[in-house]
Structures are given as C-alpha cells and as structure tokens.
Image (cartoon, coloured by chain):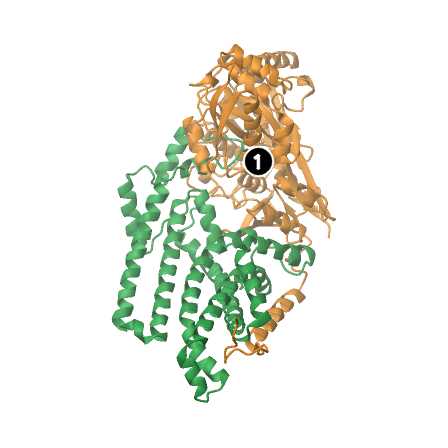
Amino acid sequence: MFSYVLRRIGVGLGLVLLVLTLIFLALHLVPGDPAMLLLSQGDGASATPEAVARVRTQLGLDQPLLTQYWHFLSGALTGDLGESFRNRQPVSEAIGERLPRTLELVGLATLVAVVVGVPWGALAARAGGWFDSVTSVLTSIGIALPVFVFGSILILVFSLKLGALPAGGFAEWGEDPNRHAQILVLPAIALAVGFASTIARMTRSAVLEMLHQDWVRTARSMGLSRRAVFRRYVLRNSLNPVVTTVGIGVGTLLGSTVLVERVFNYPGLSSLLVEAVTARDYPVVQGIVITIAVLFVSINIIVDVLYGVLDPRVRR
Amino acid sequence: MRTTHPLRTRSAARPRLAAVTAVAVAAMTLTACSSGDGGSSASEESLRFGLSAEPVALTTGVWQGSATNFMLTLIHRGLMTLDDQGDLVPGLAESYEMTDDTTYVFTLHEGLTFSDGSPLTAENVKSSLEYYANPDSGSTLIGGLGDISDITVDSDTQVTITLEAPNNAFLEYLAVPTAAIVPEASLNAETPNEVGAGPFMIEDAQAGVGMTLAKFDGFYDADDVALEEIDLSYYADGDARANALVSGDVDMIDYVTWENFDRVGSTDGITLDATPGPFQYVQFNTTEGPFADPLVREAVAYAINRDNALTAAFQSNGEPLEGVVMPDDEALEGVGDELWSYDPDRAEELLAEAGYPDGFEATLLATSQYTFLQDTALSVQQDLQAVGIDITLDAPDWSGRLEKGAAGDYDLAVSGDVGIVTNPSYLLGFVTPPDNFNRSFGYENEEIAAALTEGLRATDDDSRRAAYEEAFDLFATDVPFASIDTRDQAWAYSDDVEGFTNLTGFHTFFSGYTLVNTSLNR
C-alpha cells in the first residue's frame, strides 16, 4: 500500500513540473505584451515606446527567456510566486485569499451534488419504471444546460424577481456570515446541477450492472433482505466508478467555476485567472495554474488511494 | 421484452436520503431569504458603488483607464476642476488670473493639506507640474503641460506659471484627473499614487473585491460634501453590474453596457444617465498598400453607413459622426462637423480615380474582446464589400489588438477613443508621431498639425475659427481617420442618489468630480 501511494505521488510531482513548464512557455509565446496592456488600459491615451520599454524592464520582461524561466522555477519551488503586474500584490497572497473562496464554492457544490446524485441514481436503478424515465430526462437536461445559463436563470428568479438573494458580490465570513452564506447559495446550486446529473447517471449505470451479478442473486437466495444486499454488496461495489467520476468531476467543476464566478461576480480563484490571462498578468496566471495543477493532481492521487481502499485488487 | 429483476421493486422505495437533503437545502435557502431583502444594508451616508473594473496600482501622472480615472477624481484634485455643469472652475486654486496671454497666477486656498496631514503648498504645485511636463515621467499630459517654460513659487499659496506660447487648452489640462497635485514622495513610477487632496481618501481595500473611501475632512470644500463614505465593489461583467443595481445591492454603477440600457432605464426607481462621449473611427496603414493613397481613405469615409454601425454596435445609443467631435463652443459652431457622408457612389468614384475600379482585398483589424468594436467592424466590412473592397476580418483579443496595432500589422482597423480634453488639440496625436495602436500607422501631416496648433495658440475667436476651418478642410481630403459614430456612455443610479451629473462629451469619464455635490436621500 505504501509503495503504491509513493508511486502515485512521484508521478504527480512529475506532472506538476510538466504543467509548470508548459504554462510558462504558453504565456510567453502567446501574442500580447503585458507592459503595453498595463499602459493602454482604455480609451484616451497611448503609451510612448519609451514608457513601454521602461515598464518591461520593471517587470523583468526584457531578460532572456531562459533566465526568466529559471527565476520562475526557483521561485515556485521556494513558494515565491512573484507579484501581480497590475496591483503588485504578492501572488501567493492573492491565491491565499481567493482559493478558499473557490474551494468553498466547489466543496458546497460537490456536497450537494453527491448527496442528491448518488441516492437519486441508486433509486432510479432500483425503482425503474416512470421514475427511471423521468430521471433520464432530467439528468440529460442537467448535463446539457450550461452553468451560466442556469446561473442567469437563478439570478433572474431569485434576485431580480423575488429579491430573496443577492445577485452577486461578496462578504467575508468574519464580517457578515449571513450575507456570506446567502451569496453562496445560488452559485453552488448552479454548479451542482450538472454535476449531480452526471453522478446520478453514473450511479444508476453502476448499480444496474451490479444488480445483474451472480453473487447478488446468490446473496438474495441465501435469505438476506433486499435492503441488506443492496447496501452491502451492490452499493459498495458500485461506488468505484462513482468515486472516479466525482474525482474527475471536481476537477471539471474548477473549470466551470470560471463561468459561475463571472455571472455571480464572485471573487474566487477562477475569476482572477480569467482577468489575469486577459491582462497578461504572467505571475498571477502561472501561480494559479500551478495551484490548480497541484490540487488536481492531489485529488486524483486521493481518488486512486480511495480506489485502492475500496478494491484491494488494485493495490498489487 | 423487459423482465423484472428480483431486486427491482415496482413501487418506488422511499428516497429517505434524497428527501432529507431536499429539506435541508430548502431550509438553508429559506433561512437565508428570511433575513433581509437579499441586498447589503443601505446606510444614509454611505454610497454603495458598483465599479466596472478594479483600479490597477496607481501610477502618478499616467493615464490608466476609466476605472482608475474615477478613483483619481475622488482622492485627488488639481489646480482646476469641473463643476456639475461641466464648466472649468478653480479647484485647489481659489482663484487664478491671466496677467497676459502666456502667464497665469494661481492663488491656492489657505491651509490646504493632503490626506496624510502633510501641507499642500505652491512648492507641491511646482514639483507636480514639472514632473508631468517631463517626457521621462511617462505622463500623458505633455500635450498640454509641455508648453510650460517656467513655474515660480511666489509664496506658500501663490504660484506663477509662464508658457512658451499661448495655449487655450492649458487650463483644461489642469483639470484632467491625472494632473492632480500630489506629495513629493509620489513623484516617481514606483510609489502608488494614493495620497491626495481630494474629497475622499482610501480607508480600506480588498484586492479583487472592493474599496472603502472615507470623506477627507481636510478637503478645501469638505463642508459641502454630503457623502461620508463611498463603498466601491468591483463588477467586471456588465450584466452582473446592471443586476446589482436593479436588485438593490448597490446604489450606483458606472458604464452601463448598451444591451442593458433598456432594462436599466425602464426599471422603477432607477435612473439611466446617458450622454454621447467616445467616438469610433477607421484608422489606416498609410505606409504601404492601397491606404497610403488619400483618395482611397476618403473613399472609405464615404462608404461607411454610420446609422447601421450605430444600430449594430450600440442599439442606436449614440450619434452618427460625419466629422470630428468638437467642443461646445459658440465661436466654433459648424466647424469640423460635416466632413464626409454616406455616399457609396462617390466612394466608388474615388476608388476608380485612385486606380482601383475593381476594388481590392484588405484586412480589417478589430478585437473580439470588446463586442462593440467587433460589431462596428462587421458593419464596416459589409459597407466596404458593397463598394468592391473585399475585407477579411482579424479580431484577436485586446492584447493581440494592441500588439498588431502598434506594429502596423493591418490594412485598416476599427477603434474607439476619447480626447483627454475637449479642446480640438486632442486631434494632434492623430496627425503627429509617434505611432501608437489607436492611430493610423505611419501617418503624419504637418499642415494639419500646424493649423491645429495655430488654433490652440489663437488669442481671439476669429483667428481660432479660421485656423480650425483650414485644419478640417485638409482633414476631409487627407483623412487621418474616417469617423463612424459617437457612443453613449451611461451611469445609472437609484432615485436615492441626488446631485450627480453625467458630464457631457469626453468629460463623461470625469463625472466622478460631481460626487462632491452628491447626496443620498433614503
């Protein structure tokens, strides 16, 4: 078991290093000059070539690519991710502020999705009939509907028409816990819908497959109640693919938060990433991508380990 | 044929877990709803403002966009400012006197201080203006302040500024937010320009979320400032911003996007305050290709259907522009406003005269990041196809647009701009080097520049008018750019907000100045 975990971590580290290098190259090779962008923020004035050159030097962009890469790599390994080109805030500080907000959102959405999706899918498999058909239709809609469409609908109904919840924004938990909670509700639901639908379908297929197994029929014929068989033999074995789905889904959810944070004006990590890419704020983009890569790789390691716990055959 | 599996029951088993979850979510939502109206609490003296972008680190003297300029109108002041009618009035100066065509004597208010308590004297005026007049500082005020030949400190509260030549835009440049008088310590490119002598000061800032500004009691006009606090929140998305206002989360927003004009304007209790401001135009690569020929450029100016472009990009919230944007000045009535018109036949004639009777191919540069520019480009593309110019659209993101624009990597491009000042001298940047992404690449016209400068230096209305008439006669046939339209810039606020004015024309982005006259009446 221990060597299994160690192997997974080793592969993970290699992946993160690869991502680090790729994002650095991608940013520096894509057209767009951060210095020019900083000075040409909008209508009304254009920077002189001298001013642009001065800012490039200030930001370290006039140095050879390899030097910049080494600077970046050594910084990343010691935890120094540099400063934002735009507001000079240390990148690690910005990430430290905004990552928990996105994780909160993702965590809540995942919780809702799992709590709703797993029983729903299991029930659809067990019950069959009209319930199963309705489930099929609803989950199809849930998966097909884009998060920002659903998010906009939620805003329209609950904020603009009913005035029940805020349309967006943010309040710190410490300052205004009430408003903090209110603000999370709609975006979490928007995120959870597609995820819950996917989980429900996955659970349903997995459970259905299990129900057909010989050993399930054997257990039943040995006198165990339907519910006991379901709980002990069917559900636990079904959970393998479901856990994998949840793991990958959380990673995908991090991507969906980009749209949700935009629609709800939620100051999380994803909205910072979009802003930083648009503004070619290299340090911020690099820092966030590394963070997400590390998170994603970690989640997948956990999933693999869980898989090993659930199914001893995998460990060998 | 379906067989019933032994473990599938026909009757739906009670979905206990699902039911519990549903109840829990509902309970959470209901408790959240039951407390308050869903909006952040509104106070009597704190204006909740939804701002369209997060201001970047404030660099002294440098123009950094409308959100940053808005900040500057709140925390800084210059010698001159704009009142709620958009008129140029003294600011930090209590009064000024022009002792001759090139000499201005400013008398400051007594006892001025910055928000950190340090005194503001004539020495600060001298050091700030000299910094802005120096090309090395990267300041974009050179056009107006570059004429300064001498600044003499007469006393703590009096300063005499002498210009090399008369400049009738000089005072207007002193009212530009980036021309604020700042402490010595801020006169470099690194120190954030946060300490000022404006009506408000930064109390608290949360990166990515918002900023709280408190009233500065040492402001020279503090007694007349009604607002105690301005609570800024950043709403980068236009729809989210409009939603915040409509749902009551904020009292006021800037930059209402054109798709939201109808919705915001028709909501009870909300005022949409719109005015024509920036202008859109086609710029050219004049170093090579067909557009090096003024006849071809003129053809484009006649080919554009300005009404269509207005509808396509701004839902008609704007005005067609057949000339250039001129200040509201009686003496210049009728000058510069009708240089071209929509006349495709004339456009084809000009193309034939230039040697392109069958048209030609060209690339039109726009940007996908600002839909209004992209939509304008699509409309222009149609117009040019109609006269035989076969257009390929190139629409990178803003960053790509900047690079290509600066390098001249285009045949024509669609742009939007606003003058730093309403004085026609704002046009000088379009006809004199250096190149930049927002002007025709490689274009230079000394005659137009000379005429515009003559207008700038004129000391009487008649010679001023004559100079500009000459400038625009040349403009019409040499076409430094082909105007398309002006667009409406709108602020919007709840009926609780009184006293705010959206200043007309290019000054719309400086409307933050009128927040000193604004009060909340809940």
Q: Name the residue at 50% across, 67% down.
A: A200
Chain B drawing hue:
orange
Q: Can you say which quadrant of the picture contains the C terminus of chain A?
A: bottom left
Give x and y (percent) for residue B504: 66, 32
* Of B123 and B377, the residue lying toward us: B377
x, y (%) of residue A201?
A: 49, 66
Residue B309 in which image quadrant: top right
Q: Chain of mark 1?
A: B
* Of B424 and A169, the residue lying toward us: A169
Which residue: 60% across, 70% down?
A130
Residue at image position (59%, 63%) is A182
Looking at the image, is B393 positioned above or below residue B360?
below
The chain letter of the green chain reads: A
- Please indicate, yes or no, whether residue B501 appears anywhere in the rendered image: no
Label 1 is placed on what type of residue?
Phe
Which residue carries the number 1 mark? B372
Q: Secondary structure at mark 1?
A: helix
Could you say where residue B172 lies in the image, as x and y percent from the top left?
59, 27
The location of residue B52, given as percent across then percent down, is 57, 44
Furthest-left residue in view? A3
